[in-house]
């Protein structure tokens, strides 16, 4: 196991120390490389987890905003319907009923996006 040329140059005891020290050094380097690789992987997983958490938070904020916007739109729509219904109820002749109904429909059409009118 110990090279003969090393034993002849430095002696048996020192040759063993050099060989075993070299083996220990190689083992230490291998373990250090493995630890660095593990640390990098863990850091990447932490970054990924943080990014996923931030994405989920942003998605939740957008969902709340969409729900809030939808509720606002429904309240506006309900107010327009009530206004049109009141105008129809208060109309004194058939032409006024027609005008009030058409005004209510126009209000809904102004509020409806072009893509949902088809």
Image (cartoon, grey):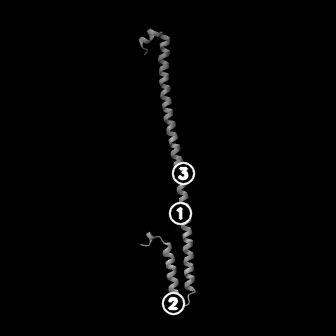
Q: Position of residue 53 (x, y in %)?
A: 54, 50
- Tags 3 and 2 in contact by the CB under 8 Å rule? no
User: Which mark sits nearer the N-terminus, 2 or 1?
Assistant: 1
Q: Is residue 55 above or below residue 95?
A: above
- Tags 3 and 1 in contact by the CB under 8 Å rule? no
How far apart are the alpha carbons under marks 2 and 1? 40 Å
Secondary structure of the residue carrying numbered label 2: helix
Q: Which residue corresponds to mark 2?
A: 94
Q: Which residue corresponds to mark 3?
A: 54
Q: Is residue 35 above or below residue 99?
A: above
**Residue under the point 51% across and 81% down:** 103
Q: Position of residue 115 (x, y in %)?
A: 44, 69
**Residue under the point 56% across and 87% down:** 91
Secondary structure of the residue carrying numbered label 3: helix
**Residue under the point 54% across and 70% down:** 73
Secondary structure of the residue carrying numbered label 1: helix
- Tags 2 and 1 in contact by the CB under 8 Å rule? no
Query: Badge 1: few (under 14), some or many (20 or more) residues near its Cα, within 10 Å?
Result: few
Query: Badge 3: few (under 14), some or many (20 or more) residues near its Cα, within 10 Å?
Result: few
How far apart are the alpha carbons under marks 3 and 2? 59 Å
User: Which mark sits nearer the N-terminus, 3 or 2?
Assistant: 3
Q: Position of residue 32 (x, y in %)?
A: 50, 30
Q: Position of residue 6 (x, y in %)?
A: 44, 12
Q: Which residue corresponds to mark 1?
A: 66
């Amino acid at each position: 196991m110990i090279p003969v040329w090393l034993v002849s140059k430095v002696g048996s005891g020192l040759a063993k120390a050099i060989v075993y020290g070299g083996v220990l050094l190689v083992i230490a380097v291998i373990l250090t490389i493995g630890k660095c690789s593990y640390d990098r992987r863990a850091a990447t997983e932490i970054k990924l987890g943080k990014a996923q958490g931030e994405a989920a938070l942003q998605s939740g904020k957008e969902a709340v905003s969409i729900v809030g916007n939808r509720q606002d739109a429904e309240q506006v729509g309900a107010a327009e319907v009530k206004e049109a219904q009141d105008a129809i109820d208060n109309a004194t002749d058939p032409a006024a009923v027609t005008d009030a109904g058409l005004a209510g429909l126009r209000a809904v059409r102004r509020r409806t996006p072009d893509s949902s009118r088809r």
